[in-house]
Amino acid sequence: MKKLFLFAAAALMVTACQNKNAYTMSGAIPVAQDGDTVAIAIAQGRSLETLAQAVVKDGKYEFKGETDTCQMAYLTLAGRPRILFFLEPGDIKADINDNGDNQAVGTLNNNRMEAFNSTLNGIFEGYGELNQKLQDESIGEAEMADVRAKMEAMENKYDEAVKTAVADNTDCAFGLYLLQQYSYNFEAEELDALLGKYLQAAPGNETLLRMKEQNDKVLATAVGKKYIDFTMNDLTGNPAKLSDFVKQNKLTLVDFWASWCGPCRQEMPNVKAAYEKYKAKGFGIVGVSLDRDEASWKKGLEDLGMTWPQLSDLKYWECEAAALYGVRAIPATVLIGQDGTIVARNLRGDKLAEKLEELLK
C-alpha cells in the first residue's frame, strides 16, 4: 500500500481562492488554558513560519485576516502542529481536541479534504487490529489468509478512493494537494493524463510544471523504450558506463538505493536472492546509490552484503542518473535487456524473480 504524507508548503493558486480575501478561523480548544497562544503557520523547509497568532480565551480562539492565495497551513498550539488545513477566504471552523480527529471545515477546500479523510478512515476501520493478527503465531494458515485478504481489500479500496478524489478535484487547491501527495499511486501514463487536466485548470502552475517535467522523464524511460546511458564513478573512484554492463549481461537491473533508505534495506534480501539464483544465466545488477557520504555508502554495501557493481555521484536526491530515469522515490529499479530495451520497472519482492524466470528460461 502506498501512503505518502509529505505536506505541501507552497502556495496553491487556483480559481476557487480568488474571490473575497477575508477569512476568519475559530473554534473550541478545551486542551488549552486561557492565555495560551495558538498560531497559523506555514512550512518553510524544516521549520514553521508564523503568519498570525491568537490568545485562547474561555476555551476558544479566533483569527481574522485577509489572504489573496490559498495555501496549506498548520494550526499550532504551543508551537506543535495540530491541524493541517487550507488557509483561504471564508469562515473556517476547527476545534482542537486530544482525540486525534482534528480537522478544519467551512470552506470549499477544507470541506473536500475533511470528506476525503473521513472516507479513508472508514476504509481503514479495523485495519490496525488485522495487522496485529498477522503477528499472532497461534493463528492458523486459513485464518491468516483471510486476514491478508481483508487487508488487501481495504488497500484496494484505498487506492480507488485516492484515484477518484484526484480525478474529481481538478478545479481546486485540494486536488493539487492530493496530486502531489499521491502521485506515486499512479502509473506514468495515468499521471500524464491527470497533469494535462490540472494544467488546463491552472496553466503555468510551477508545481504542476515540475511534476510534468519529472513524469516526462519516466515516460521516456518506460517499458519498451531504449535505456539512457550514463557515466558515474565506481567504488574505486573510476568512471564507469552503464552501457558496459548492459552489453555484458542478458538482463541488467539498475537498482537505485541508498544506505539511509529503510525500504531499500528491507527489499535488498529479495534482490540478493534473485542475483544468486540467476547470475549464472546472465543476470547482472548495477547499484546506483543516492548517498552523499562515501563512507556511509561503502558501509551500507558491507552491511547488506551487496557484491555487484556499484556507482554513485554522491549527490543525494540530485543524483544525475536518478534524474534521467525520473526516479522520485527509492528503492526503484529498471530492468534492461541486452539489446538496450527496458523490459520492466520497479519490480518488488517476488515480482523480480518471477520476471527473471520468465525471461531467462
Image (cartoon, rainbow, N blue to C red):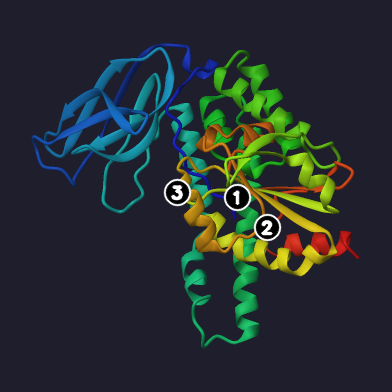
Q: Position of residue 302 (x, y in %)?
A: 52, 60
Of the residues under marks 2 and 1, which one precedes in the sequence? 1
Q: Disc 2 versus disc 1: distance between alpha carbons?
A: 9 Å
At label 3, the amino acid type is Ala
Label 3, secondary structure: give it: helix
Please give the name of the residue rendered at 47% of the width and 66% of the height, measured from the top-left corner: 128
357 sits left or right of 18 in the view = right
* Residue picked out by circle 3: 295
Q: Nearer the viewer, residue 248 or 124?
A: 248
Residues at discs 3 and 2 in contact (Cβ within 8 Å):
no
Residues at discs 2 and 1 in contact (Cβ within 8 Å):
yes
Q: Position of residue 68 (x, y in %)?
A: 40, 12
50 sits left or right of 193 in the view = left
Any mark on residue 348, and which?
2
Q: Quadrant of the C terminus?
A: bottom right
Q: Disc 1 versus disc 3: distance between alpha carbons?
A: 20 Å
Is 161 situated above or below 130? above
Is 2 situated above or below 148? above
Q: Position of residue 165 (x, y in %)?
A: 61, 38
